[in-house]
Amino acid sequence: MDLLETIALAIVPVVLAIVLHEAAHGYVARMFGDQTAWMLGRVTLNPLKHIDPVGTVLVPGALLLIGAPFLFGWAKPVPVNFGNLRHPKRDMIWVAAAGPGANFVMALAWALLAQAAAPSGPWTSDGLYTMAQIGISINLVLMVLNLLPIPPLDGGRIAVGLLPMRAASALERVEPYGFIVILVLLATGYLGVIMMPILRIARFLLYSITGA
């Protein structure tokens, strides 16, 4: 299978992984009292509402082209006014966890599809199997990346919600520099070093659940 075919097969799982991740944040925020994302039309499966040209298209595409060990990307962040939540510190945890949670559910679905499309499955298809494998990888990578406890990643938000007020306030002050920290980790190779062991655990858990 050549590179263009691989890119074509990656489009659906990559877009779904990013769009559903963001929509899940907005949906759960609405459940807990914040209507911001809903009023702005961001609680939707329409990819045009979520796509960031760089994070959703250029970065995953470039990673595919250079044969990177894993794919990741991002969408336009869903706006959440944490002050509108009924219990801001506690509810922030659920809103933040919704995105990675959606990615894990999607990884489960792609794993089941991979079983069905495998040579021994009922819907044998090389293309569908490759698409499912990409779907598993992108969703697990997005889940693990976003769970790192670095604001403004979801893991940072979860940590802020769980930590005592003083420690939470200190962590919140890291947020303006969080993206720089991630870029430095990526450029130096340490991001992969940190993520790979967690990804192996996540993949083992996934396959234990699905029996793949």
Image (cartoon, grey):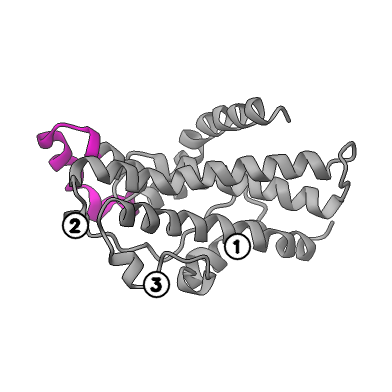
Q: Which residue is mark 2?
A: 84
Q: Which residues are magenta?
A: 160-181
Location of residue 159 (image quadrant): top left
Measure the alpha-carbon separation of dots 3 and 1.
Answer: 29 Å
Q: Nearer the viewer, mark 1 or mark 2?
A: 2
From the image, give the main secondary structure of the stretch colored magenta: helix
In the picture of the structure, the residue carrying the numbered disc 1 is: 62
Amino acid identity at mark 3 = Gly
Residue 44 vertical position relative to residue 91 in the rendered view, above or below: below
- Side of 18 where 38 appears, left or right: left
Residue that lies at the very extreme toward the left in this rendered image: 166
Query: What secondary structure is found at the residue carrying circle 3?
Result: loop
**Camera sees residue 87:** yes
Mark found first going from the N terminus, 3 or 1 = 3
Q: Which mark is residue 41?
A: 3
- What element does badge 1 sit on? helix
